[in-house]
Amino acid sequence: MEKFLLRNTENPNSADIEEYIKTGGYKNISKAFELQPSDIIEEVKKSGLRGRGGAGFPTFMKWSFASADKKFPKYLICNADEGEPGTFKDRPILEKNPHLLIEGMIISGYALKAEYGYIYLRGEYPYAYDVMNQAVRDAYDKGYLGDNILGKNIKFNLVVHLGAGAYICGEETALLDSLEGRRGLPRNKPPFPVNAGAWGMPTIVNNVETLANIPHIIEIGADAYSKIGFPDCPGPKLYCVSGHVEKPGVFELPMGISLREIIYDYAGGTKNGKKLKAVFPGGISAPVLPADSIDCAMDFVSLPKAGSMLGSAAVMVMDETVCMVKIAHRAMKFFERESCGKCTPCREGTEWLRKILERIENGRGRNEDISLLTDISNNIFGKSFCALGDGAAGVMKSILKHFRAEFEEHIKEKRCRFKQKD
Amino acid sequence: MITLTINGKKVVVPVGATILEAALQNGIEIPNLCYDKRLSPYGACRLCVVEVEGQKKLLAACSTPVTEGMEVKTETPKLFKARQTVLELLLVHHPLDCPVCDKAGECKLQDLAFKYCSTKSRFKGEKKHELVDTGSPIVERNSNRCILCGKCVRVCGELQGVGAINLLGRGFASKISPAFEETLDCEFCGQCIDACPVGALGSKPYKYSSRAWFLEAHDNICPYCGVGCTVTYDIRDGKIIRAKGIEGKGINEGNLCVKGRFGFDFIYSKTRLKTPLIKEGDGFKSASWEEALNHIAKKLKAIKDANGADAIGAIGSPRCTVEDNFMLRKFMKDVIGSDNIDSSARFGYAKIQRAVEMSFGLESLPVDFNSPLGKEAILIIESDITSTHPVWGLNFLKAQRKGSFLITADTRETKLTRHSSQWLRLKPGTGTALLNGIIKIAFDEGLYDKEKASRISGLSFLSDGVKDYTSKKVSDITGISEDIFINTAKRFLKAGSRLISLTIGTSEDTKGLNTALAAANLLLLIGEGPASLQMPAEYCNTFGMWHQGLRQGRSGRDIISMLYGEDTVKALYIMGENPAVTFPDASTVDKALRGLDFLVVQDIMLTETAKLADVVLPAASWAEKDGTFICAEGIEQKVQKISQTEGEPVPDWQILRNLSRAMGFEVGAKDISALQDEINEIKTAERTAETIFNPVEYIPGEVPDADYPLTMITGNLMQHSGALSVMSRSLSHVLADAFLQISNADAEKYNVRDEGFVKVASRRGSVMVKARISDEVPQGSVFLPVHFPHAKINTLTHLSLNGEAPLSAVKIEAVK
């Protein structure tokens, strides 16, 4: 497939504005400016683009809600807080193709009548921060950003804001709090950010990859775009593969490709040909899939049917040497650490999940522990303030569902058999 | 309106209500720990989860808006389980030190655990071991008991506009703390204590003084400012040991400031008068009531016989009840036969009242507690409302938060300036010039209500009167840049609804009659009515005292003639006032008081004034008598005897009645209800309101010069009120000493060290105070709070009679 999101990224100078322009960059801005803002939103609607951040919410819907709000100024915010474990799909865009993102934001800003944009960048991406800042400066110098873009009296100003390393700030309302200079805590919804977001104004928060798709839609038109990949949620998709595979990396593939193809055709199969055990198809917040489920298509529609979700499309592959209790423990350690502390079920629940898993893994598990894990998960799932708790509980429940025997074995034998093999 | 079903019961609630609000309005309880009516929904504790038909997830009732036809269930086995688990998890780390926790018996966690939890827990975890923050003066924080509901953080930030505490850390390690885990240092309103559902925040004065179930709660009205808050006092053994606000109660709807919450203890001061005292040599001797009253009767008669009734005067008190002041006036009129009666309101509220009469032709203009809400533009002229009327001040902050354009014109940085949409940092006392300048812009730009204004007499005088107040001149006088002044003025004039608020108090020196008149002129010109000018009465009963006629009678003398003139009175009867401390130009007052032939002071303590008296009579405090206060909103509220007295204090009105009897007059008032009936029969004359423009000039106060180069601003602190609050032990723990606030630049110029002593001198006298270097005051101005008797700040001040701001010029000298 022809690459679009990662176009020209093999070129070591791909982040350079001149290189970007040479390969056809920024020409979609002029094309977009000839359209009415509402026409662009219509194009995005026809394209069928769905948000690439994890939930897969139709992009045009978010855009229409924000456009319908009469309050000004409006803000366009790029969520580049790529903190989901195993996820590094936005990173090549931010580090190697920054102007694609800027171009996407300029067009989106024009379509949404938002004159101010922010890129909320993950705190642990210092290199991307430098690259993005340089790119923004260059774009200003070339007249692509500013108060009078291309002499067309169109205004769009862009600021790169570096986060401080909290996972929760990838949640869009917590991101807004953090951007405003507060402690990053998820906000109550409603009001939704499209009506009352940054500084109380209508705000559109889109993922890096979502915004990077916009120039492509303008370039080839909504009709052609909607024919790429899976019809219900079309477009090119970045899949980032890690874990026990021969060739980990980011792959730009049409949406809806099967998990098997990703692992075996693109990532070179399992490392040293070992037996596949389990896969997290969409980051650590997406329920785990056992080895026999990998024929599932990787898109926003098919994965939920298979009991998981696409999430951030971070494919984490685990082979037969992996202890699933340890995986669960490692995951809960992460959620415990990153829980913002606002709501009781998540703050206290994740801590207990971690503690109980720790004792099972260390051979001190008790018979009632499996039911306790289930009970705590059930009391987080659907009862926490934001999706962080749901993610933690969902993953815990999925691991228990598919690998319950392993937990029972740990408790019964009072040891972890994977440990001794090392 | 929206109709929904809760537990099978159909209820109708307003659009926008949450499920929890709908339930509470209909008497259905849903358990919660983080909900507070005054705050925006937070949704953290997850106890208020409910089941909604058609929704897979459980929804948090506190943050889910109701929709038409919604079917809600609040008590199901599934919900019971969810709540039980939340509580079980919260209890794991909680110290469960209920036997030594002040909150026990009124603790929400305790009550909910009682309802939902079993005696066994499936979890065994470590208890928290944080150090208890005992370092701050009156609030103690024990974060081991904290359940992280965040109410204190939100009350402090969202409601109080302070933000002294926040959550630190993340997830399980979250804790509530001041920045950098320092000791709490805030305005000590204590709102967080009332908000805390558990025992994590407590009142230090109350600590370990009682179990909650031994307390008897009584509502009463706060004795401090004019807002008239309802305070719930907890009584044990006849003594108030704690004050709290109860959600939704009173004008204040349960909000209290530091004075209201902690300041009640002045009535238990060791210095309370217990028996009447009669001067003997340099000191006093205790006397019986009979002896004292007969002594006074004899003396007053003698003075009246020798010099006539006009030689006797009386000063009433805005802190005493309507009944007390009524009785004082009656005593003066019927027993002494004199109209020489006045109060400290002469220096403050009288100016407001005069402006109201002159501009609007109204007998009185009470303020409206909710007036700031919903106004498009609000202009506050040199008034620190969050200090003088703290709970009312919250509504200004709230208005700003909800979208009002709040303009604060003030020299000093205050809580209001920090929350303003536009802060105009003007030179002290130049508010009149600012207002005149805005009026001129309104004329020049046609931004006034031509039709309404033309119907008011004096329009052409007004336009002539402000002719000279060009933006350039206003900028020169006020020090505000011309651009900012013009833009702000236009923003105010073009707003759809407008409000001006200012206070004029006994201890404030940046505003005078002219300021109030200029504000009235501006509002009338732009078509606003009297209600858009909000000038609150100062103290708990200033309004009531004034409108019960405790002021200079037609043929009588006012305070100025009684105390400051060449020909002062010979005898003075002072009830609940401390002129030696609170009146301007203290040296003159002191001289006048010492020159009296006979001085009677009835008060709760031996004040600076009482020390000069010939007879001192112990009066009952506000909590030891029945009576009435009328607050700044013009609302009559009853105060009750809720505390027992030590010694022999008697309510002021009763002392005066007894004295009348001792002087051979029967004045009625056999008991409080007879007296109240008599007061109720008096009809105040209605006046036909006539609005008039009263053009005024900006007259500078005392202008700084080479000898006295600094402008002194006097005013109030949030933690104190007049000279009353300094008798409170709790409030004195927060602030007990006068200070001079000075800018860094001036401190350098005059060699002043932070916390070093300085001598401050005006043309009338000098005082010694500690200096505090602060950027809250700009170069060229210094600020001095007036509350502290020992500092005698009023030695520096002067009387002002010409409508100008009574500012004083001072010089300072660092003391080695």
Image: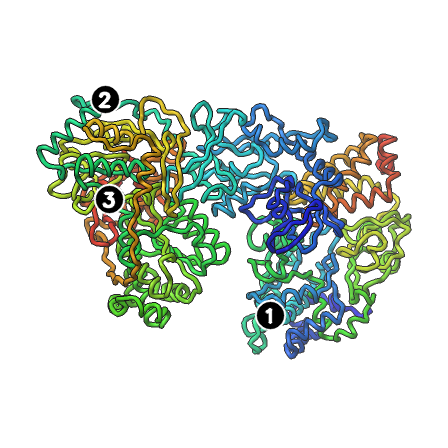
The disc at residue A113 is: 1
- In the picture, residue A125 is in which quadrant? bottom right
Q: Amino acid type of disc 3?
A: Arg
Element type at mark 2: helix
The disc at residue B551 is: 3
- For residue A71, side relative to residue B297 (left or right): right
The disc at residue B240 is: none
Most foreground residue, A69 or A403: A69
Query: Which callout, 2 or 3, points at the residue further toward the start of the chain?
Result: 2
**Crowding near the residue tagged with mark 2, few <14, some 14–19, many ≥20 C-alpha atoms within 10 Å:** few
Disc number lying in front (1 or 2): 2
Reply above or below: B134 against A248. above
Residue B111: horizontal and vertical position, in percent?
Answer: 63, 32
The disc at residue B290 is: 2
Residue B47: horizontal and vertical position, in percent?
Answer: 66, 41
- In the picture, residue B733 is in which quadrant? top left
The residue that appears at 32% across and 59% down in the rendered structure is B520
- For residue B805, side relative to residue A32 (left or right): left
Most foreground residue, B303 or B263: B303
Q: Amino acid type of disc 2?
A: Glu
The residue that appears at 68% across and 71% down in the rendered structure is A41
Quarter of the image where the C terminus of chain B is located: top left
Disc number lying in front (2 or 3): 2
Q: Amino acid type of disc 1?
A: Lys
